[in-house]
Image: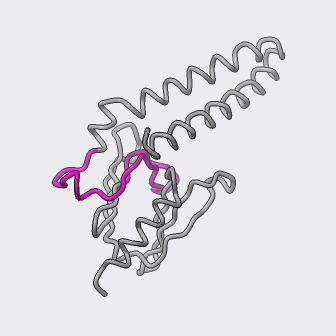
Amino acid sequence: MNDDKKATLKALVISSIGFTVLFGVIMALMNGMGYALVAAPIAGLLWGLLMYFFINSKKVKQQTQITGVEESDIIYSGGANHFKNAEAVGGKLYLLKNKLEFKSHGFNIQNHAFIINTDEIAEVIFFNTLGLVPNGLKLILKDGDEEKFVVNNRSLWKTAITAQMQNQPS
């Protein structure tokens, strides 16, 4: 199992546990502890399975595939969310020799593709999603704009992007 799949599975397990706890608290407040102890683990397991099948569906993989690029040109890729306004748009992020390309899947409100040349990036820094979860990657662009992504293995992403930034002619 490659690193991205391991990180995705780990994120699914952690989010399923979080969903179970949150759902359990709500159910305990609404229906009592006995009901919550049964319903919450079932709901958490179902949520995790549904998310797993969604992420690995042929439809999502097809919608997030970039075109006009050879497989050998892709340096690194993985599932990601791109913050666009208030929405964390789900899709896939690709690092190529001279650019980053994001392509959303069709199950978002703001479907889009986003391309940024690596020579337009001034800095790559980390941030914590919701101030807690260490999975954010922020690109500070040379024009002062910022682009935020939620990714697995953000250290690998930062290292790979920085390497490509340094390989660009000045």
Asked if residue 71 lies in the magenta stretch, the reply is yes
Q: Quadrant of the C terminus?
A: bottom left
Q: Magenta stretch: give its range.
A: 65-93
In the image, is residue 64 above or below residue 141? above
Asked if residue 77 lies in the magenta stretch, the reply is yes
Quarter of the figure with residue 57: top left
Residue drawn at (31%, 71%) of the image: 117
Residue drawn at (78%, 27%) of the image: 25
Residue 114 x/y as whole percent = 33, 59
Residue 63 x/y as whole percent = 28, 40
Give the farthest residue toward the front. 1
Residue drawn at (34%, 63%) of the image: 100
Main secondary structure of the magenta stretch: strand
Residue drawn at (36%, 52%) of the image: 77
Identify which residue, 79 or 71, lies in the foreground: 71
Residue 14 placement, left or right of 138: right
Q: Quadrant of the N terminus?
A: top left
Residue 100 placement, left or right of 157: left
Residue 124 x/y as whole percent = 49, 71
Asked which colour scheme the image uses, the reply is one colour
